[in-house]
Image (cartoon, rainbow, N blue to C red):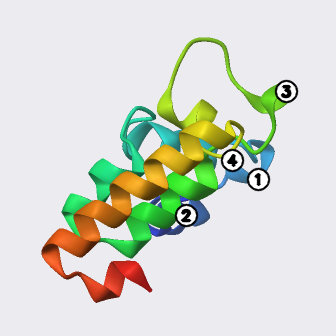
Amino acid sequence: MELQVVSCLLRHQPYIPALPELGRKVSRFLGPSPNLSLSEACIYDSIALLDWIWDSSCTFIAERSSGWSQHNFLRSDNDCYKWEFAKGMQFVARDGNVKILE
């Protein structure tokens, strides 16, 4: 996933087409911590942040990077997924945040 500001900035740089991964790497550096859980992200009331975390998480065990991070396990580990979903729903229900629930 690439931040719009990074995409806009890099679009005007003459050498960027030679570095197709640069936008994603800069965005990954500037984006949320790979240890920010989906349930903790609910605090920020941002669907874009929740989408970012979901999209940046591994879907298969083989895609996991070395070392532990929340994003390595969110979608590739069924128990982690269920736990995060349940914790997120508790937060949403407690605060009555229908926008996030949808």
Q: Earlier in the sequence, mark 2 or mark 1?
A: 2
Q: Quarter of the image for the N terminus: give it.
A: bottom right
Query: Viewer-nearest of labels 2 and 1?
Result: 2
> Which residue lies under the disc numbered 2?
7
> Which residue lies under the disc numbered 4?
15
> Which residue lies under the disc numbered 1?
17
Q: Amino acid at mark 2?
A: Ser
Q: Earlier in the sequence, mark 3 or mark 4?
A: 4
Q: Identify the residue shown where x is 79% and y is 44%.
A: 18
Contact, CB < 8 Å: mark 4 with mark 1? yes
Q: Quadrant of residue 21?
A: top right
Please, is residue 47 above or below residue 12 in the view? Answer: below
Please, is residue 56 above or below residue 61 in the view? Answer: below
Q: Earlier in the sequence, mark 3 or mark 1?
A: 1
Give the CA distance from mark 2 to mark 1. Answer: 12 Å
> Which residue lies under the disc numbered 3?
62
